[in-house]
Image: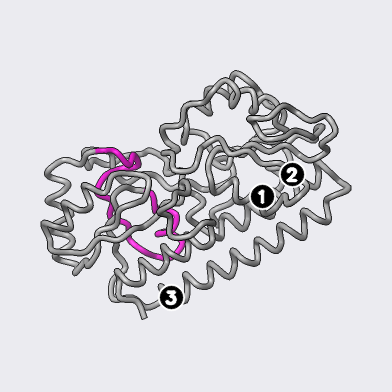
């Protein structure tokens, strides 16, 4: 299991049962609004909070649509929103500006997703050497997201006991949908001509681990990293040896490396979205739709039946 068995107990420790009520980060607080104030730092956890919290919460996401979340810089108002939140859902190490702001503001309730899972390490640094950097893309495993949805529902019920049944129902509904998504991945990736895929950067370790795939990243975790010539030559050899058909790029970073490699090898390119944010070019406009689009891309690339 990616999430530890003690996830609920850990979540109970890190989430504090405190007063609620506030509008979005760019609006003044409303003392008559009894909803739980949640601030998230990246789209997948905004999706999670909105679906589990429903009408009983207000959710503010610090990363704007179309922005690269790794490069997030916070405004003074956004820092203030962290201090005012009843709950902040974030991921330590993903966005340094958020880590710094949380150390300064000390919000009432904090959920660090990285404390609730078994990490995957980045197999590469930018020069192709072995690395030990933790991959933060836990949300690309729908089973892990389901576990987190259940824990979040439980903790929201602690924050607002009179709405506990609603949170439990909403959390279970989302967990069931994520279970269906997991079943789709298992079924459609069950029999493939190959299990290796080449992506622009090492964002898909959790997805690969869950579904027994082999991720070959052109560069490490940074989407803007430049691989060495030796790394590019290594991937070219691997692509030829394993019959790779597709080089994947993503929506929020430059496709230049993927296009160059694909052009050199005579291969096609396609999008494999790490779902760090939404844009007008996104294949879908919610997490589940984007995961299904990624699944379809993997099926096409690996000739799955």
Please give the range of residues in magenta. Answer: 203-225
Q: Tags 1 and 2 in contact by the CB under 8 Å rule?
A: yes
Tell me the crowding category of disc 3: few under 14, some 14 to 19, or many 20 or more residues within 10 angstroms, Cα based: some
Tell me if 237 is positioned left or right of 182 in this view. left
Tell me if 144 is positioned left or right of 216 in this view. right
At 36% from the left and 64% from the top, the residue drawn is: 213
Q: Which residue is mark 1?
A: 50
Q: CA distance from mark 3 to mark 1?
A: 29 Å
Q: CA distance from mark 1 to mark 2?
A: 7 Å
Q: Which residue is mark 2?
A: 57
Q: Quadrant of the N terminus?
A: bottom right
Q: CA distance from mark 3 to mark 2?
A: 36 Å
Q: Tags 3 and 1 in contact by the CB under 8 Å rule?
A: no
At 70% from the left and 26% from the top, the residue drawn is: 84
| Image quadrant assignment for residue 101 | top right
At 53% from the left and 27% from the top, the residue drawn is: 99
Query: Which is in the foreground here, disc 3 or disc 2?
Result: 2
Secondary structure category for the residue under label 1: helix
| Image quadrant assignment for residue 142 | bottom right
Q: Earlier in the sequence, mark 3 or mark 2?
A: 2
Numbered circle sitting on residue 188: 3
At 77% from the left and 57% from the top, the residue drawn is: 168
Secondary structure category for the residue under label 2: strand
Q: Tags 3 and 2 in contact by the CB under 8 Å rule?
A: no
Q: Earlier in the sequence, mark 1 or mark 2?
A: 1
Q: Position of residue 4 (x, y in %)?
A: 60, 50
Q: Quadrant of the C terminus?
A: bottom left
Q: Position of residue 176 (x, y in %)?
A: 65, 66
């Amino acid at each position: 299991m990616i999430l530890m068995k003690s996830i609920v107990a850990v979540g109970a420790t890190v989430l504090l049962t405190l007063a609620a009520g506030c509008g979005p980060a760019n609006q003044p607080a409303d003392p008559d609004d009894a909803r739980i104030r949640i601030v998230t730092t990246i789209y997948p956890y905004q999706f999670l909070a909105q679906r589990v919290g429903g009408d009983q919460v207000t959710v503010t996401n610090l990363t704007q649509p179309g922005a690269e979340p790794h490069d997030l810089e916070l405004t003074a108002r956004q820092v203030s929103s962290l201090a005012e939140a009843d709950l902040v859902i974030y991921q330590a190490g993903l966005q340094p500006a958020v880590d710094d702001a949380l150390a300064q503001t000390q919000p009432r309730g904090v959920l660090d997703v990285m404390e609730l899972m078994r990490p995957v390490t980045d197999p590469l640094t930018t020069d192709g050497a072995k690395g030990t950097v933790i991959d933060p893309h836990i949300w690309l495993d729908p089973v892990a997201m389901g576990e987190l949805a259940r824990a979040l529902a439980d903790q929201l019920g602690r924050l607002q006991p009179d709405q506990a049944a609603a949170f439990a129902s909403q959390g279970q509904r989302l967990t069931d949908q994520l279970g269906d998504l997991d079943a789709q991945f298992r079924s459609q990736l069950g029999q493939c001509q190959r299990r290796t895929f080449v992506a622009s950067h090492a964002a898909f370790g959790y997805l690969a681990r869950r579904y027994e795939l082999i991720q070959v990243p052109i560069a490490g975790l940074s989407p803007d990293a430049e691989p060495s010539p030796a790394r590019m030559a290594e991937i070219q050899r691997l692509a030829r040896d394993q019959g790779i058909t597709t080089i994947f790029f993503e929506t929020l970073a430059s496709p230049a490396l993927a296009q160059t490699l694909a052009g050199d090898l005579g291969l096609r390119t396609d999008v494999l979205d790490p779902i760090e944010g939404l844009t007008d070019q996104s294949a879908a406009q919610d997490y589940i739709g984007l995961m299904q689009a990624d699944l379809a891309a993997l099926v096409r690339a690996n000739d799955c039946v």
